[in-house]
């Protein structure tokens, strides 16, 4: 790239702003023009729900940069309210409309970055144009919702993914009655079902109406409210509706220009973020990247990847092949809703199953720090691993504290191609306020290698009644308070002296609260000649720990 | 290992208890005898300070297991108050004294585990036997201190390592006046000096008297107090003294038996925890293990390694070469004192320097989560890396929140032999309450690769006055409130138009609050032909963020 040349950037939020900033760092002289359709650049997208709910009180805190600050800091020529209408790849020009004046002009470039982002999916339902129906993508959406929440009493959130849940929390925080409607039969459909149950329970406990396996058929407006008709035939009244059913890449302009798009309309890029046209880069929510574990095509509309892709593209533009490629995305994500956190990194079981991959599941439960230190909170960790290479393929965690830490450790382990054996000996920071001498990540390694070494066989669902003897080894009082269905109670310390209570001809399933004692019991029984499996992760793994009456085994 | 055989374990706390439990899991029938000199087994060593201070109120919570529970759960024959006096390797017997009755007996074994642990170092100083002087290693020590704190007003803690600091916090919590005395010229001598400064500042802010570069010459008792005479000649009065100057392996019995010991009296073991004698294993604080990054001999007296070593030894005893070896220790450790946390993993700069290794330092400062989300707290991260392989060799972090998470990610990265390039693209969990789109770990990768790519040269100390032009690019009001010494202030946005204020013949050092703007400024100046270096990590890196008047550059 020659310093006298001109870089044009379409889109000035995460990927576009990162690209432009890195370009300036690499070259003081090159001309950099950033076109942004909206009135803001480089704003804190992920903070929008928290301003609506009042957790963030200063709106300016979200406007990370302004065109003026970017000019002063980075000599960027930032043009807001400027919409790129078409690209002429041959002539290396872009038609730009000024959305305020209505004028259009042709801007030439030597290098082009496409960072148009994604836009919320808005299904063509009856009544969808009602002004009480919102999506949340930028500061203007946020302002519109914020202006309406003070007079609204009832909200319906459509879609129980990350943004839907964050908005549900914030609307509830403001005192609204909130109903969340999700097509899938679980909240957080990004996670495997059992890993979303703590979140579902938390939502209900906080007074949220959770409607699953249901969708919106249409909206019926009246003056005093908007009636949301569900596919089940029921309806829910709302003063405010948030649609958060996903996003799609905003790539019409790229398609019209003739750039190669993927099957779901993402711009196809290589590992240097190059599109199918020389000199044209793309990054962020609009692109199809690769999955970091498998190298398959993947799209991950998240801020972290967007920022880092923008940086990679700038490096390639100025450093060429000396630049370091973008290694692909894992799809690490997390959400906090009220006191519960849940997240994932890498592959889920659902996805592994859909792709026909061979995998093993390890499920562990433990406290987030030493149990004897006050404030220890339970956490569930699900690990997916490859039975051939033993590599970690994915992880999900849910709990109250420390969920982000375990996901980050496992995201790092996946990148390092580490195995379940490696997890046994991760040496994580331990003092009672922070962790345990054997962290839950170590425990997951132990549990996986125990299976690998044939010390124990685990099951993740209980057998049909009658197929096996279910032995619950929890202490009597705990068992009596909440007996597991179809089981007999043999507290672990009495197991060795109670073997004659069991039928040696019939398989045994051991079960306990956390999956640890049931493993111990399975070892005792196996060595005594029984055919035995342990129920992985224990009852607590399928249970809201604060309402242990609700036993869900699945 | 034949099931009819007998396993003898000397020491029943972390390594010994883990070993015995794992043996039982692997074999239901083998006889397992655990000898423990003290009255307790498998207690929560790391929780002792918190019971003294009252954070943990239930003493039973610390007694994780009892001989009875271990018999019931694991069929272990646990003999407390039983001291192993000598080992006859030839005869495969151990002489055991019952500390209550005074009787001795000879116990035979087929396999032996030595997990004697370590004991506090107690220097032979005048007056050292005064009953007001304590060490803290077991529940009895804890009880003695606890019994004394209600009547004590002034405490002296000797040694500002992890336990010394934890006890300092807890004694202060109880209302005592606390003086901490440390031989080194910094608190937390395990860390590099600049990484201990936030902790030192926190101690002082909490009213702790911090005496550095000083030691105890002797204790002079009187009825009403104990006068602690310092090497400097000063003295400090105390009603209670805690000695926490380190531990040494409790290995006399091993030496007398003829087992190979290392240069500091640790039992030498291989990666399966085998000692120099067939059938004799050792694990925990008493052994010499290997450093996980270099393979050098190392000893790490911490609970995590002890537990995992015990497990490895049991696996080897029953599974032989099929067992997975202990991969060595990193020495990951963390401490929380009042609101500050600090810790490390892998090598420090001090150690790299002492070993004559080639290394690079990268220092970054950032908030622990998105700055626009309430509650963001500053954090400092120091990374040591190999300029040849680019691998991470060590990391230290200090701050208020999220310190453990970054240490754990970097401990995992070290094990995965990951490079500073890999850190750029770790995809860590991000939502505003948890992190940033570019986490401080990513920033450390960016900063290191910027140096690697010759985009910027950094310095970690400021030049002598006059050698260079120091340009502080912080905003005017911040600069004026706390000017950096010997600098001129050119706020970054005005830098490009102020180049004529600088002498092109004289090198420039750029400086700012966090090390980011100074890097930006260095890029501008370098591309304008200046010879320039950036002050790494910024002023905040050497500063208590709550008292920014105290500028410490070093």
Image: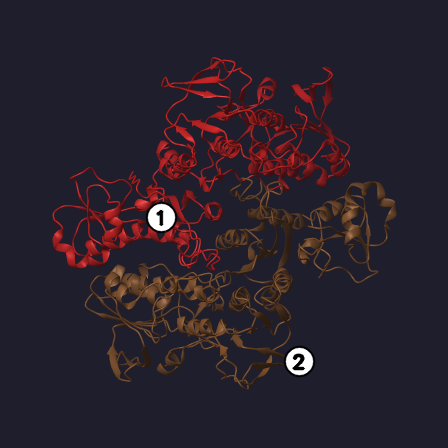
Chain colours: A red, B brown
Left/right placement of residue B91 relative to residue A283 reads left
> For mark 2, does the 10 Å Cα neighbourhood hold few (<14), some (14 to 19), or many (20 or more) residues?
few
The quarter in which the C terminus of chain B is drawn is bottom right
The answer to which of B350 and B16 lies nearer the viewer is B16
The reply to whether label 1 and label 2 mark residues of one chain is: no
Total labels: the figure holds 2
Cα–Cα gap, marks 1 and 2:
54 Å
The answer to which of B67 and B444 lies nearer the viewer is B67
> For mark 1, does the 10 Å Cα neighbourhood hold few (<14), some (14 to 19), or many (20 or more) residues?
many
Above or below, A381 relative to B487: above
Q: Do the residues bearing badges 1 and 2 touch, measured as CB atoms within 8 Å? A: no
**Residue at 73% over, 58% down:** B551
Which residue position is annotated with label 1?
A364
Give the percent coordinates (x, y) of residue B125: 54, 84
Q: Secondary structure at mark 1?
A: strand
Quadrant housing residue A27: top right
Q: Which of the labelled discs sits on residue B232, or is there none?
A: 2
The answer to which of B115 and B474 lies nearer the viewer is B474
Give the percent coordinates (x, y) of residue B501: 87, 47
Q: Which of the labelled discs sits on residue A44, or is there none?
A: none
């Amino acid at each position: 790239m020659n310093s006298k040349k001109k870089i044009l950037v379409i889109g000035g939020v995460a990927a576009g702003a990162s690209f432009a900033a890195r370009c300036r760092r690499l070259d003081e002289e090159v001309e950099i023009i950033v076109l942004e359709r909206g009135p803001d650049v480089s704003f804190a997208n992920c903070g929008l729900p928290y301003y609506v709910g009042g957790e963030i009180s200063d709106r300016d805190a979200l406007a990370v940069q302004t065109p003026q600050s970017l000019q002063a800091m980075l000599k960027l020529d930032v043009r807001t309210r400027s919409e790129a209408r078409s690209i002429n790849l041959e002539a290396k020009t872009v038609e730009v409309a000024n959305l305020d004046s209505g004028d259009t002009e042709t801007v030439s470039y030597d290098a082009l970055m496409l960072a148009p982002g994604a836009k919320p999916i808005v299904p063509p339902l009856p009544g969808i144009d009602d002004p009480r129906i919102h999506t949340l993508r930028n500061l203007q959406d946020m302002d519109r919702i914020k202006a309406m929440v003070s007079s609204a009493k009832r909200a319906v959130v459509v879609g129980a993914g990350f943004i839907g849940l964050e908005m549900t929390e914030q609307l509830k925080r403001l005192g609204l009655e909130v109903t969340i409607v999700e097509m899938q039969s679980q909240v957080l459909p990004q996670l495997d079902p059992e890993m979303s149950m703590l979140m579902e329970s938390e939502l209900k406990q906080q007074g949220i109406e959770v409607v699953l396996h249901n969708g919106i058929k249409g909206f019926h407006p009246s003056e005093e409210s908007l009636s949301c008709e569900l596919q089940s035939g029921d309806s829910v009244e709302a003063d405010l509706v948030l649609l958060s059913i996903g996003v799609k890449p905003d790539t019409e302009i790229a398609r019209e220009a003739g750039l190669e798009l993927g099957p779901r309309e993402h711009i196809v890029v290589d590992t240097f973020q190059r599109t199918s046209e020389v000199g044209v880069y793309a990054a962020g929510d609009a692109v199809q990247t690769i999955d970091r574990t498998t190298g398959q095509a993947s799209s991950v509309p998240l801020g972290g990847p967007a920022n880092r892709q923008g940086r990679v593209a700038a490096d390639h533009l100025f450093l060429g092949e000396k630049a370091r490629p973008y290694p692909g995305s894992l799809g690490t994500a997390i959400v906090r809703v009220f006191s519960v956190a849940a997240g994932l990194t890498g592959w889920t079981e659902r996805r592994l199953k859909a792709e026909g991959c061979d995998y093993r599941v390890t499920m562990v439960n433990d406290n987030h720090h030493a149990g004897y230190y006050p404030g220890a909170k339970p956490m569930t960790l699900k690990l997916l691993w490859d039975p051939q290479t033993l590599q970690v393929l994915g992880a999900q965690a849910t709990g109250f504290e420390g969920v982000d830490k375990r996901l980050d450790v496992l995201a790092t382990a996946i990148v390092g191609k580490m195995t379940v054996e490696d997890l046994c000996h991760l040496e994580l920071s331990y003092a009672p306020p922070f962790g345990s001498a054997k962290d839950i990540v170590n425990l997951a390694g132990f549990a996986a290698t125990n299976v690998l070494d044939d010390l124990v066989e685990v099951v993740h669902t209980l057998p049909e009644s009658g197929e096996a003897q279910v032995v619950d080894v929890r202490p009597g009082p705990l068992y009596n308070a909440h007996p597991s269905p179809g089981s007999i109670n043999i507290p672990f310390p009495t197991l060795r002296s109670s073997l004659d209570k069991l039928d040696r001809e019939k398989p045994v399933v051991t079960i306990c609260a956390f999956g640890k004692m049931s493993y111990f019991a399975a070892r005792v029984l196996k060595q005594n000649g029984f055919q035995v499996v342990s129920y992985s992760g224990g009852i607590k793994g399928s249970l809201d720990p604060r309402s242990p009456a609700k036993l869900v085994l699945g």
